[in-house]
Amino acid sequence: MKVIVGQGSCGIAAGAQKVYNAIEDKISAFSGVTLGVTGCIGMCYLEPIVDLYEGEELFARFVRVKAEDAERILNAAQAMCLDDVADLLIEDEDKAFLSQQTRIALRNCGIIDPTSIEAYIAAGGYEAIKKVLSGMTQEDVIEVIKVSGLAGRGGAGFPTWFKWNAAKESKGDEKYLICNADEGDPGAFMDRAVIESDPHTLIEGMLIGAYTIGAKEAVVYVRAEYPLAIKRLQNAIDEAKAKNLLGKNILGTDFSCEMRIKAGAGAFVCGEETALIESLEGERGMPRLKPPFPAQCGYWQKPSNINNVETFANVAWIINNGGEAFAAMGTENSKGTKVFALTGKIKKGGLVEIPMGKTLRDVIYGIGGGIKNDAEFKAVQMGGPSGGCIPKELLDTVIDYKALGATGAIMGSGGMVVMDSSTCMPAMAKFFLDFTAKESCGKCVPCRIGTKRMLEILTRICNGEGKEGDIELLEELCLAIKDGALCGLGQTAPNPVLTTIRYFRNEYEAHINQKKCPAKECSNLITYEINSDKCKGCTLCAKKCPASAISGELKKAHVIDQSACIKCGQCVTLCKFGAISTN
């Protein structure tokens, strides 16, 4: 019996390393039981997760495990009896989280050992590159990718085959293949999870891409905030070299390719491909004018191709199963599957991979289980700072590039942040504008100055200082920035503002005209009041008020001095009688 502990970053943050250490300390007393690790299965809300395997079959899955559960789990593994650990077993409704998905990019995540190339090979790994090198031409590979309809999963959705073919056709003996793993969207962690959980699928996909365009060097640009991903990817690169799957004359053929990792400093703008290239060359990460495009003049002014992690993670599966199999999933305009990071006010947060064509409702309520505390769904932010908010009226929107674009949002790299009725939409727009304004490289005036002016207006509105004409001014600035910005960061920065105005204009008007926040989130627009009929005069709120703004006698109704109240909300949290309300 094998005991496997999930050790993605989410699991480790929840205590998986402590669980692993506790099991490791005790396992010597249990004969026939071994210990291993895996990556993130995607059910981040249930971490730490421990799986029991009998041979290659999953025997039991334990969730929310603690270090003190180690001995019980080991006893269950040795006896192959689950009676004493029934409280740790995953529930049937949580099993549906995975059963409703179709996994291609995530096919090995949370199943194989990410630190072992043998585990990847046993799961069919590196068969695709063998197939390519044993008889497929560059044109053959491009045709398979073309038939598959695989589009870049980094956000733009540009046809992968077209980019590969453009780089292949560009003249030059020196070409480069680059993986963009600079995942910077707030709430997004798809690429990190793939690298941490199945690094060899990235390597194999990149090898196939490098062969196809004629590159002899491949670079993975990954942000330095992903130390576990970097560690496991470097280990995988070393393992692949040891088996002649990287380096000179791979698998005894004429194809040679070296691979290395570049740790980026975490600038959001370096997710834009030309800014990424600048950073790779040791320069400040600032976008270049296009054309020329990277396929003609990229890294060191040589023909280069850039795709993100998820794009490469699909490649080996497509080669092994055929382009038609991938194209059979999805919609007419968007083929295959897409990975999403489901976060926010959602009951079951984690990684989700679904065929294109599912609806937002399918993901949020079907897989994600609905809204926390059964609150009212309000909106979902798609595409991170470059995307937009989609309201509850459009919950049945189909997930594909065209349908999401029609709402004003974008597919993006796959962030899906769910919001309930307690979320203030002008404040949400302000949050994303604050992010993009800080992350602007400053090269072009529309982005450098325009995002700051928009942020100033949004800050005024959320502080109760908005004035007539602010909404129209925001709209005017949005359009000017979209038209004038140099790169995708600036061109898409207005999207959160435009979509929140489009679908939640009444909230902006309430902030400006009535000086009220309907969601009761903007502290400057909230008034706390004590209901004298409900107040028991326990004095707890008065004693704990950091501003000494509450006064009253014991067992008599208290009052709040509005001029002294700092609107921290602590009194509402402390009151056991529900006597304090917000208005």
Image: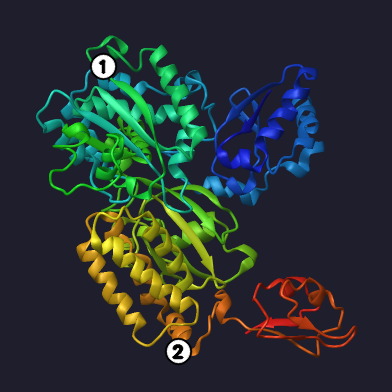
Secondary structure beneath label 1: loop
Near-viewer residue (397 or 446): 446
Instruction: Write the residue at 57% across / 49% down.
Output: 96
Regarding residue 576, the answer to whether it shows in the image is: no
Q: Return the residue found at the far top.
A: 252
**Tag 2, which secondary structure?**
helix
Q: Which mark is residue 256?
A: 1
Judge by depth and name the residue closer to the eye, 220 or 541.
Answer: 541
Mark 2 vs 1: CB contact within 8 A: no
> In the image, residue 57 lies at what x, y percent?
60, 28
Cα–Cα span, label 2 and label 1? 66 Å
Q: Which mark is residue 91?
A: none
Which class describes the residues within 10 Å of circle 2: few (<14), some (14-19), or many (20+)? some
Q: Is residue 125 left or right of residue 367?
A: left
Residue 457 percent across, percent down from the top left? 39, 75
Q: Nearer the viewer, mark 2 or mark 1?
A: 2
- Percent position of residue 117, x then y: 47, 20
User: Is 93 above or below relative to 404?
Assistant: above
Q: Amino acid at mark 1?
A: Ser
> Which quadrant does the N terminus fall into?
top right
Q: How is the image coloured?
A: rainbow
Res 143 quadrant in image: top left
- Earlier in the chain: of badge 2 and badge 1, it is 1
273 vs 295, left or right, is right
> Going 71% across and 71% down the picture, which residue do you hit?
570
Query: Residue at horizontal 41%, vertical 51%?
Result: 414
Judged left or right of residue 249, residue 3 is: right
**Point 30% across, 67% down: residue:** 450
Residue receiving disc 2: 513
Q: Nearer the viewer, residue 162 or 1?
A: 162
Identify the residue at the far right of this view.
Answer: 555
Specify few, some or many for label 1: CA neighbours under 10 Å numbering under 14, 14-19, or 20 or more. Answer: many
